[in-house]
Amino acid sequence: MHAASTLQRTCSLPFVLFLVLFSGCASVPTRLVTGYTPAAGEKAAKTAVSMVGRPYKERGDSPAGFDCSGLVRYSYLAAGLDAPHGTKELRNTTAAVGNGKMRKGDLLFFNENGKNYSHVGIYLGNSQFVHAPSSRKKVRKDSLKDPYWKKSFLEARRFNTENGL
């Protein structure tokens, strides 16, 4: 009995190591945001634009004040999707979209101050996006053609759908 128990432990050790080493590589979203359609993306973009001029507020997700991911959450809630708050969470619930395939409502992720995926905005089309830039500033529209945003742009992402992108 003791020999069988030892054999069982040593055989399961490689399996456990495999799980530990490779589970981090999986691209499974932390939670699925269901109900995304191009119309929902357009409605979220329209809602975000209507918030231009609203103040920045750390962890804010209402017209009283927004941080970047709070603006995304608020805008998508208005479109009927329960998007998470936080750039990491948004990245984990979306799938990459090629630059030539971006459409209104896609999320644009940026590298700010050397931190990857530290800022997010909502794509409006024609290289324009809306975002809550930082403290002491207000929600505004900017262009991906602006040298600052062009340099810090990482990728466009879209909420997953049952049928892919």
Image: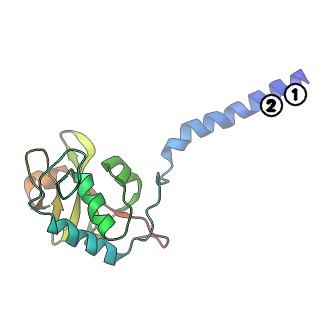
Expressed as whole percent of the image width and height from the top left, the position of residue 6 reads: 81, 24
Q: Which sits in the foreground, 117 or 99?
A: 117
Q: Residue at x 54, y 43 (%)?
A: 23
- Establish if 58 lies above or below 154: above
Q: Residue at x 18, y 39 (%)?
A: 113
Can you tell which mark lies on residue 4? Answer: 1
- Establish if 98 lies above or below 24: below
Name the quadrant containing residue 41: bottom left
What residue would you read off at disc 2? 8
Number of numbered discs on residues: 2
Asked whether the residues under the numbered discs 2 and 1 touch, taking CB atoms below 8 Å apart as contact, a structural biologist would say yes
- In the picture, the quarter occupied by the N terminus is top right
Identity, as a three-letter code, of the amino acid under mark 2: Gln
Q: Residue at x 31, y 49 (%)?
A: 87
Q: Secondary structure at mark 1?
A: helix
Q: Residue at x 39, y 59 (%)?
A: 94
Identity, as a three-letter code, of the amino acid under mark 1: Ala
Residue found farthest to the bottom: 39
- Establish if 164 lies above or below 133: below
Expressed as whole percent of the image width and height from the top left, the position of residue 57 reads: 17, 47
Query: In the figure, is residue 32 to the left or right of 71?
Result: right
Query: In the figure, is residue 129 to the left or right of 43?
Result: left
- In the picture, the quarter occupied by the C terminus is bottom left
CA distance separating discs 2 and 1: 6 Å
User: How crowded is the residue under tag 1: few (<14 C-alpha within 10 Å), some, or many (20+)?
Assistant: few
Residue found farthest to the top: 2
Q: How is the image coloured?
A: rainbow
User: Is residue 81 in sight in this rendering?
Assistant: yes
Expressed as whole percent of the image width and height from the top left, the position of residue 152 reads: 18, 49
Expressed as whole percent of the image width and height from the top left, the position of residue 64 reads: 17, 55
